[in-house]
Image: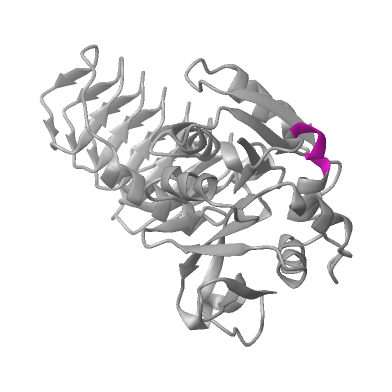
């Protein structure tokens, strides 16, 4: 079995962070979402993975090639334009061959991994299996939704219906055998000019192929928006096993039991309450780091209060007059302030931004 990860999107909903960084490389709990997807596939026993890449291909390849902990064989498959998920399947045909495969959107985070899903698909003669998640009915129009038959098989799929026929949303994880390539060849572009994976799956259903659902009971988050990145960060921080590296320096500080402090980090005269993670080489001085905060490597924080935030590498935050919360701070950003009366701050800063609070 092979894996196929879609990582070609531009991430416009995460601007300005994604002006200079592929959205799949933005980290939750200090690990890029794309790396978490690769690990989920590897842990399910699949080590031959194709990654669909677009304009951000050089950055993605550089980031992944720099890692020695992935344990998979990666083939990069360029997509010249965002022409739909089914188009991504189409251009991956040579890589997939006749193998069964799992397709995973590279900006999704899911609880519990996909090991059981792949085991079920491998043990049955199904032509496809799709992962679904119940969502509030009022929100279902934002997703592709599925309608099931009484026997539990999939009857039909509808892409972002204004009046959803069910509350079962597609979550961006699919399993296929080689018949999906026939389906892709027989569908037409949608009104938005893309080859839709929902149309390809519907073709399989209409032509008598077996498509089975798996309704996921745990959490699942599409990290396409800032608030969703923070929500995913919350969930992952609650799951990771906390530890303090032996090379970390902690002086005159209070550290919660649910905190991870990575190699070479320094925490001086500060309070860190978990769940939280402090990256390698980061220095925290005279500050409060509150729950659900991820601070990446080589960051400097001085005289600040930070809570429920993601702060990326090489940033500097100093002398903020109010608690920084619910914020994403990009790489090499600088945030500072003076000592006037505190007031709440809420920011989403791109890489290399500089903001000074009067």
Say above or below: 332 vs 327: above
Position of the N terminus, as image quadrant, is top right
Q: Main secondary structure of the magenta part?
A: helix
Could you tell me which residue is drawn at 53 percent across and 64 percent down? 213
Task: From the top left corner, tell me how far across and down residue 169 is, in percent.
Answer: 54, 69
| Residue 21 at x, y percent in the picture | 63, 37
Q: Is residue 357 above or below residue 66?
A: below
Foreground pick, 16 / 37: 37
Is residue 354 in view?
yes
Task: Please check the rendered image and state whether residue 92 is part of the magenta-colored stretch, yes or no.
Answer: yes
Can I make out residue 15 in this image?
Answer: no
Q: Nearer the viewer, residue 323 or 296?
A: 296
Quarter of the image for residue 190 reads bottom right
Report the colour scheme: one colour
Q: Is residue 189 left or right of residue 5?
A: right
Residue occupying the point 70% across, 69% down = 205
Q: Nearer the viewer, residue 34 or 344?
A: 34
Q: Is residue 339 left or right of residue 332?
A: left
Question: For residue 304, which quarter of the picture?
Answer: top left
The image shows residue 90, relative to residue 132, as above or below, that is: above
The span shown in magenta is 91-95
State the residue at coordinates (56%, 71%): 153
202 is higher (above) or lower (below) than 12:
below
Residue 99, percent across and down? 69, 37
What residue is drawn where x is 27% and y is 46%?
A: 238
């Amino acid at each position: 079995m092979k894996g196929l990860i879609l990582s070609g999107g531009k991430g416009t909903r995460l601007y300005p962070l994604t002006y200079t960084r592929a959205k799949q490389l933005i980290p939750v709990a200090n690990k890029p979402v794309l790396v978490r997807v690769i690990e989920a596939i590897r842990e399910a026993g699949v080590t031959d993975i194709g990654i669909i890449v677009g304009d951000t291909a050089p950055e993605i390849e550089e980031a992944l090639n720099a890692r020695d902990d992935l344990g998979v064989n990666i083939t990069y498959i360029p997509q010249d334009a965002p022409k739909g998920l089914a188009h991504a399947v189409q251009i991956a045909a040579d890589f997939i061959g006749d193998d069964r495969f799992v397709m995973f959107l590279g900006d999704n985070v899911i609880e519990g991994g996909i090991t059981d899903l792949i085991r079920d698909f491998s043990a049955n003669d199904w032509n496809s299996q799709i992962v679904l998640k119940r969502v509030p009915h009022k929100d279902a129009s934002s997703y592709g939704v599925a309608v099931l038959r009484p026997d539990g098989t999939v009857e039909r799929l509808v892409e972002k219906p204004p009046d959803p026929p069910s509350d079962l949303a597609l979550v961006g994880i699919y399993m296929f055998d080689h018949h999906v390539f026939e389906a892709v060849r027989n569908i037409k572009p949608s009104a938005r000019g893309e080859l839709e994976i929902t149309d390809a799956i519907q073709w399989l259903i209409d032509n008598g192929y077996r498509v089975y659902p798996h309704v996921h009971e745990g959490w699942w988050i599409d990290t396409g928006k800032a608030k969703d990145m923070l929500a995913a960060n919350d969930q992952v921080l609650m799951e990771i096993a906390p530890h303090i590296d032996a090379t970390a320096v902690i002086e005159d500080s209070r550290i919660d039991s649910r905190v991870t402090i990575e190699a070479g980090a320094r925490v001086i005269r500060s309070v860190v309450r978990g769940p939280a993670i402090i990256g390698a080489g980061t220095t925290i001085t005279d500050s409060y780091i509150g729950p659900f905060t991820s601070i990446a490597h080589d960051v400097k924080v001085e005289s600040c209060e930070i809570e429920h935030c993601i702060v990326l590498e090489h940033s500097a935050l100093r002398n903020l007059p109010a608690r920084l919360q619910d914020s994403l701070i990009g790489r090499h950003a600088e945030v500072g302030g003076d000592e006037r009366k505190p007031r709440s701050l809420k920011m989403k800063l791109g890489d290399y931004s500089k903001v000074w609070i009067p």
